[in-house]
Image (cartoon, rainbow, N blue to C red):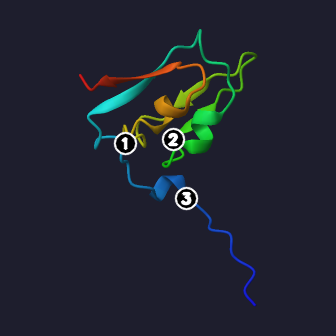
Amino acid sequence: MEKGAVIKHDIKKAPKTGEWGIEFPNIDKEKCLGCGTCASFCPEAAIELSAQEKKTAQIDYAFCKGCGVCASVCPQKAILMKKKS
């Protein structure tokens, strides 16, 4: 019986997918509670919580595809999708 495996990820070898999107998330730092819901739902793992005193979501736009999942799951509606300029 197989027990599974751990896949090691090398961020240096990962393709930069951030250029694919048309819209990108914009976080309102005042509204963000730092709950991590957006980070847990992000299909690209492009969101992390800051290590500051007041934790807030931080987006790595090099990997964010602009899918909008984070904006739709945010309980505070602290994330809005904005068109790429």
Please, what secondary structure does the residue beneath circle 1 have?
loop
Can you give x and y, in whole percent of width and height, for residue 82 in the image? Answer: 33, 22
* Direction bottom: furthest residue: 1
Can you give x and y, in whole percent of width and height, for residue 81 in the image? Answer: 37, 25
Q: Nearer the viewer, mark 1 or mark 3?
A: 1
What is the crowding at mark 3: few (fewer than 14 residues within 10 Å), some, or many (at least 20)? Answer: few
Spatial CA distance of label 3 from label 2 is: 14 Å
Give the residue pinned by disc 1.
Answer: 65
* Residue drawn at point x = 26 percent, y = 26 percent: 84
Give the residue pinned by disc 2.
Answer: 46
N-terminal of the pair, mark 1 or mark 2, is 2
Please, what secondary structure does the residue beneath circle 2 have?
loop
For residue 75, side relative to residue 3 (left or right): left
Spatial CA distance of label 1 from label 3 is: 19 Å
Q: Is residue 25 above or below residue 69?
A: above
State which quarter of the image contains the C terminus.
top left
For residue 25, side relative to residue 76 (left or right): left
* Residue drawn at point x = 37 percent, y = 42 percent: 65
**Residues marked 1 and 3 touching at CB (< 8 Å):** no
Give the residue pinned by disc 3.
Answer: 10
N-terminal of the pair, mark 3 or mark 2, is 3
